[in-house]
Image (cartoon, helix red, strand yellow):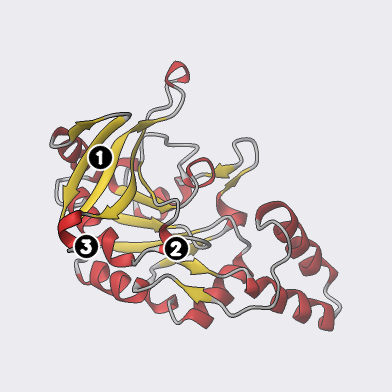
Amino acid sequence: MAETVICWDLDETLGFFRPVANELLANAAARGDLGVSRRLEALVGEFLGARPAPAPLRLREGIADLLAAVRERGIRQVVTTGAFREYALLGLEKAGLAPLFDAVFSREALWDELAGGKRYTPVLERFAVGADRILIIGDDFKKDRASDHMDAVMICDQDGLDHPAAMLLPVIEALTAAESVGAGFVSLLASARPHPGGATVERGGVTASIGYWGNYTRGERTPVVSALRWSRAQNG
């Protein structure tokens, strides 16, 4: 059976890693490494926003346990980030998450300047899978969806950093239960209930919106699950 690969965004999805930029900038300045300094300054200014104030790195609640649980199911997991490689590697190392991933794909490999987002072809080539075998999890639709394979399924967890990671597991299980993630999405959508402005599904005490996002006139139909919340029953 072909592999399934989950592609995790870094910042605001796995946790808050932006303070790592301060450490890297300080190290580069101490070495007199202007090349690294310029790259990081560009990252901070254009991608991360204002330079983060000194603060501790913060992980999303329960993310390490979730990653371990998904890994036990035989699903490959990679980081796909718009950040530079040295930033991503240091952040994952400091957070203790590095051993839970099969690979890290950084800005150097993925970033699509024209689209202002990410290309996932390097992931498909590395694991010899089609776009229907990957599941993208990120907080920003424009930046995290696949600019080169817009039919790749995405969980757009826009404010996920403020909610426990455990709520992702039932949705991941539903999307990966079929012969492909694409087929899993179709099955999940077929079970959805109509709702004003879209459709909703419930799995394992979690409710979510489900549908297609994008510009239909340009043929952009990205399958998206979003707005994950504990159901009333889960909240007790």
Picture layout, residue 133 above or below residue 148: below
Q: Nearer the viewer, mark 3 or mark 1?
A: 3
Q: Judging from the image, what secondary structure is the residue with disc 1 in?
A: helix
Q: Nearer the viewer, mark 2 or mark 1?
A: 2
Residue ID for mark 1: 182
Residue lying at the far front in this picture: please name it. 236
Q: Judging from the image, what secondary structure is the residue with disc 3 in?
A: helix
Picture layout, residue 214 above or below residue 201: above
Name which residue type carries label 2: Leu
Residue ID for mark 2: 161
How far apart are the two marked residues, 2 and 1, measured between alpha carbons? Answer: 26 Å
Q: How many circles with numbers are drawn on the protein?
A: 3
Nearest the eye: 143 or 181: 143
Whichever of callouts 2 and 1 sits on the residue coming sooner in the sequence is: 2
How far apart are the two marked residues, 3 and 1, measured between alpha carbons? Answer: 30 Å
Residue 97 in percent (x, y) is at: 43, 77
Q: Residues within 10 Å of mark 1 (few under 14, many from 20)?
A: many
Residue ID for mark 3: 235
Q: Nearer the viewer, mark 3 or mark 2?
A: 3
Name which residue type carries label 3: Asn
Q: Residue at x 52, y 40 (%)?
A: 142
Whichever of callouts 3 and 1 sits on the residue coming sooner in the sequence is: 1
Q: Are marks 2 and 1 in contact (CB under 8 Å)?
A: no
